[in-house]
Image (spheres, rainbow, N blue to C red):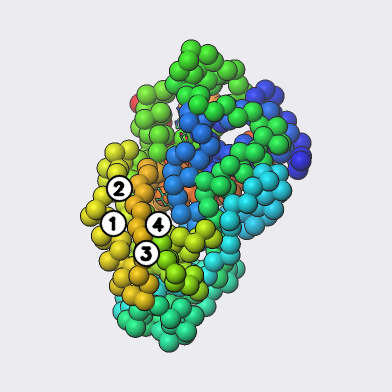
Amino acid sequence: MTDQQSNIDGTVVIIGGGVVGCFVAYRLASAGVSVTLVEQEGPGSGATGNSAGNIQPGSGSDDTYKIALGAESLALWRKYLPQIKAAGGIDYLEQDVRYIYAATNNQEERESRQILSDLTAAGLKAEWVDGPTAREIEPRLAESIIGGTLNQDCIQMEPKLFMAAMAKAAESVGVTVLRQKQAVGLTVTGGRAKGVVFQDGSSLDCSSVVLATGAWTLKIMSEWIGYDLQVEPVGLQKLHLGLGSAALLNCAVRWNSVNIVNRRDGLVHAGSKLDSAGFDAKPSDETRDWLLAQVAAIMPGFQPSSVETIAAVAASTPERGIPLIGELPGTDGVLLAVPSTDGFLMAALLADMTTNLMINGQAHELMQRSPLAQAAPR
Ligand SMILES: Cc1cc2nc3c(=O)[nH]c(=O)nc-3n(C[C@H](O)[C@H](O)[C@H](O)COP(=O)(O)OP(=O)(O)OC[C@H]3O[C@@H](n4cnc5c(N)ncnc54)[C@H](O)[C@@H]3O)c2cc1C
């Protein structure tokens, strides 16, 4: 399906087959661009496949601006999901989800009401509910909840299944996906990227390169072209909890930075907790116990029948989690699309920004605010 006409000569190589790289590839190829996507393992094998799969504006300590970006991205997800589903031909168990951002004291209430005001200002469906109403919706919630923002504009899906569908959808619009292919460098001639070099000794000429390399970006940029970027690999751990014979949760809850949400496969996700170990992050008893304690405190009526701990690495950017997005200053033909720890949510917007920039030369306001705008080679 072609939704625009490309004026790009030659192949765009996208390095990284997470949700961002695949979404960018899908959008560019849909616009008629020749795209090759390079992934060192398989699509979704990085942070994406291990994420909670929440498309949830206003999670974490997002400010007004990030919530507005999240709302823009959510709208793009809603626009493109039906096409991806039809082209991918795989049920990725998506669902609309209601999240209660629970408050148990005055400070939490102030924070939750600020999120409410930002969500409604961004045009999302949200309202304040008091404690009894929250417990009417989900009786297993704690008596300590005095109220919360009910965010009714979220989607959740199974990220591994989604990535299988997304890769198929990308291939259906003409993307060449190279799996198990590791890029190890760029060919830069006269200040412009002209090709990508692979570990097996082969190379590929290109008109430009999009780095959608998530947590690997810091190392790649430093070793390949000598940039020190503001992006860190951070570990994140989550739990998959069994419901046993208990009923599905009637709504999701977020409290103390932890999301608790039903998946459609019957498991409950609880997470995530940051871990400074980065690429060495491993499931730990300490994190499992901390996450279980949060679940017990906010939803004491839910007793998990089983517990699995999962750890993975994601990129984290400073500046309130603003993504590294846009053209790399100082080296022509290199673009970055690297989100912070909310990259599942932001993927649709990053793909839209990249496509608009490459095809129409239009830069979204975020690109000026991105830490990338200040980047320079060493
Ligand atoms: C436990 C957990 C829960 C999360 N929950 C959520 C959530 O609910 N909602 C949300 O919005 N975000 C969530 N996140 C964050 C989210 O998963 C990430 O921000 C997002 O998936 C990043 O996508 P990406 O495509 O940028 O990176 P990745 O998915 O990490 O993809 C990068 C890819 O690049 C490939 N690559 C790297 N270097 C090379 C190379 N040299 N050659 C070829 N390929 C290469 C890697 O193999 C990898 O597949 C969560 C993360 C974790 C770990």
Q: Considering the numbered disc 2 on the image, is that residue within a helix, a strand or a loop?
A: loop
Q: Give the number of the mark in front: 3 or 1.
A: 3
Within 10 Å of disc 2 (Cα), the crowding (few <14, some 14-19, many 20+) is some
Q: Earlier in the sequence, mark 3 or mark 4?
A: 4
**Residue at the disc numbered 2:** 283
The CB of the residue at mark 4 lies under 8 Å from ligand 1: no
Q: Considering the numbered disc 3 on the image, is that residue within a helix, a strand or a loop?
A: loop
Q: Which mark is residue 240?
A: 4
- The Cα–Cα distance between marks 3 and 4, rounded to whole angstroms, is 10 Å
The answer to whether residue 329 of the structure is visible from this angle is no
Mark 1 residue type: Arg
- The Cα–Cα distance between marks 3 and 1, rounded to whole angstroms, is 14 Å
Identified at 37% across, 72% down, the residue is: 302
Q: Which mark is residue 288?
A: 1
**Residue at the disc numbered 3:** 305
Question: Residue 218 sits in which quadrant?
Answer: top left
The CB of the residue at mark 1 lies under 8 Å from ligand 1: no
Q: Considering the numbered disc 4 on the image, is that residue within a helix, a strand or a loop?
A: strand
Q: Earlier in the sequence, mark 1 or mark 4?
A: 4
Within 10 Å of disc 1 (Cα), the crowding (few <14, some 14-19, many 20+) is many
